[in-house]
Image (tube, helix red, strand yellow):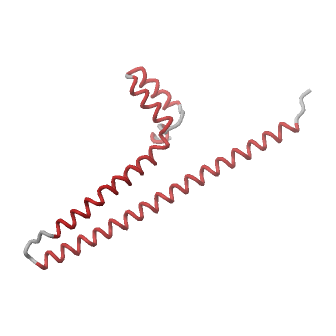
């Protein structure tokens, strides 16, 4: 088992031990570990949302910067034209990367949803099998 799997946001012996140790050493550390255990699964979504909002805020700054920087020229028309073309090409590449990131995030959300659905279906089958097995057995 690798370390990333051992300290996941779940009630595992490692996370419980870290939480208790955190409370013993310095109580805010234990509280932080407890929060990680309880809300750790939501951190990825929170991080993704925060990054998306920050990207949205700074997108306006990038547009303003690119408009502002085009007013200043070096005096060499060929260089300025090349520079403008390269900046536009880089902007298109950035947009493509952002789109690929969105597609990947969507793909990962769908994988997690499918895994959750599979686990739920397995639980319901096991529960149904247990209830069928218990109804057929009569203790005297």
Q: Quadrant of the C terminus?
A: top right
Of all residues, the one furthest to the left in this rendering is 75
Lateral position of residue 60 relative to residue 78, left or right: right
Q: Is residue 15 above or below residue 85?
A: above
Q: Is residue 63 above or below residue 37?
A: below
Q: Quadrant of residue 27?
A: top left
The residue depicted at 44 percent of the width and 43 percent of the height is 43
Of all residues, the one furthest to the top in this rendering is 24
Residue 105 screen position, x and y as percent: 46, 57
Residue 5 screen position, x and y as percent: 49, 41
Q: Is residue 88 above or below residue 117?
A: below
The residue depicted at 41 percent of the width and 65 percent of the height is 99
Residue 49 screen position, x and y as percent: 42, 51
**Front residue of 104 and 65:** 65
All told, the count of numbered labels is 0
**Front residue of 130 and 72:** 72
Residue 113 screen position, x and y as percent: 58, 53
**Front residue of 58 and 95:** 58
The residue depicted at 28 percent of the width and 60 percent of the height is 60
The residue depicted at 38 percent of the width and 54 percent of the height is 52
Of all residues, the one furthest to the bottom in this rendering is 78
Lateral position of residue 29 relative to residue 9, left or right: left
Lateral position of residue 87 relative to residue 25, left or right: left
């Amino acid at each position: 088992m690798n370390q990333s799997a051992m300290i996941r946001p779940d009630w595992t012996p490692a996370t419980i031990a870290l939480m208790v140790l955190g409370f013993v050493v310095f109580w805010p550390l234990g509280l932080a570990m407890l929060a990680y255990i309880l809300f750790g699964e939501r951190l990825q979504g929170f991080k993704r949302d925060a990054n998306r909002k920050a990207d949205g805020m700074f997108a306006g700054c990038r547009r303003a910067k690119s408009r502002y920087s085009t007013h200043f020229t070096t005096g060499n028309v060929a260089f300025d034209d090349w520079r403008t073309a390269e900046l536009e090409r880089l902007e298109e590449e950035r947009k493509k990367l952002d789109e690929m990131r969105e597609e990947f995030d969507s793909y990962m959300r769908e994988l997690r949803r499918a895994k959750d659905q599979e686990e739920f279906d397995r639980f319901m089958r096991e529960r149904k099998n247990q209830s069928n097995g218990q109804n057929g057995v009569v203790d005297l």
